[in-house]
Structures are given as C-alpha cells and as structure tokens.
Image: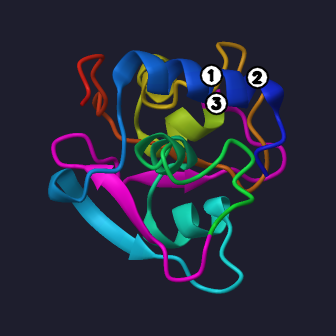
Amino acid sequence: MFAHSAFTVAILAIVASCGVYAQEPNCARNYTVSLGDTCDGISAKTNTSTYQLATVNADKIDAACDNLAVGEPLCLGIIGQDCDVVHVVASGDSCDAIATSAGTTDAILLANNPNVNSECSNIYPGEVLCTATELVYTSSSS
C-alpha cells in the first residue's frame, strides 16, 4: 500500500514545506472511516488521489496508513485545491498512458502527484492519481 520508503520521504517533505493539514473549516469534502477501509480504497471510492488523502490528513494518518480508526473523520481535499478527477493505477500502467487517457500532460500529471518520481517508476496498482488537466496544488498551500 504505502510501503515505498521514497513515498514516505516525499510525503514528509511535502507536508513540512507546505504545512497542509486536515482543517475541517477548509475541507472541500469529508469522509468517515469505516471498518475495513484502506487509504487506497478510500481514495478510489471518493475520487481523491492517494497523495491528497495522505497529505491533507498527515496529522491523522501515518506514512504506512496503518492507523485508520473506525469513525475517524478525514478531510478529502482543501477548498480551492481539491482534485476529484482521478485514475486508479492498474498493473502495467505508465504515466504516459495515464496522462494521454486523461487528456492531460505528463508534466501536469507529475505536478499534481508529487509523490510520483520523474521516471514514474514508483506507481503501484491500486494507487490513485490526480488526473486533472490543470494544476490543482500550489506551493503556497495552507
């Protein structure tokens, strides 16, 4: 699920630099954790990228995403920076194919999914990527 150490480092660096935390007053959408939920599963069923779910809820979800609590409220996106156009990665997917299918560019796909490296070699089946055709996140997130 979130087993990639590079992903963990990327999320921690992004959270530290952006200061994005779950703040209910700024939430565009909310979700309550149910029994059996996983981060990728929540992301897929709510059209929220894995990156966005982890980043917005960094104060609640650990890097391995193994501490979800039934009944816990999660913020799915921050108002003005909420990507709800997504693709669930399947085995054999590439960033080029995902971007082309979504009608976006590799550059925008990578910018909207900062957890994905430039070679796109760290995506995995079940991961949910933001496939918006314009930039969703800005460096001045708060």
Estimate the x, y position of residue 126 in percent, counting from the top left.
73, 57
Kindly identify which residue carries mark 2. 6
Callout 3 secondary element: helix
Give the amino acid type for the residue marked by disc 3 in the picture: Cys
Estimate the x, y position of residue 90 in percent, counting from the top left.
75, 53
Left or right: residue 19 compared with residue 117: left
Q: Earlier in the sequence, mark 1 or mark 3?
A: 1
Left or right: residue 51 compared with residue 133: right
Find residue 95 and name its label.
Answer: 3
Residue 39 visible, this angle: yes
Kindly identify which residue carries mark 1. 10
Give the amino acid type for the residue marked by disc 2 in the picture: Ala
Considering the whole magenta stretch, tell me its main secondary structure.
Answer: loop
How far apart, in angstroms, are the residues tagged by discs 1 and 3? 18 Å
Quadrant of residue 80 within the rendered picture? top left
Q: Which residues are magenta?
A: 69-96
Give the residue drawn at x 32%, y 69%.
Answer: 30
Mark 3 nearby-residue class (10 Å; few <14, some 14–19, many ≥20) = many
Callout 1 secondary element: helix
Decide which of 131, 37 is in the foreground and name it.
37
From this view, report whether residue 105 is shown above or below residue 33: above
Left or right: residue 49 compared with residue 23: right
From this view, report whether residue 18 is shown above or below residue 41: above
From this view, report whether residue 38 is shown above or below residue 56: below
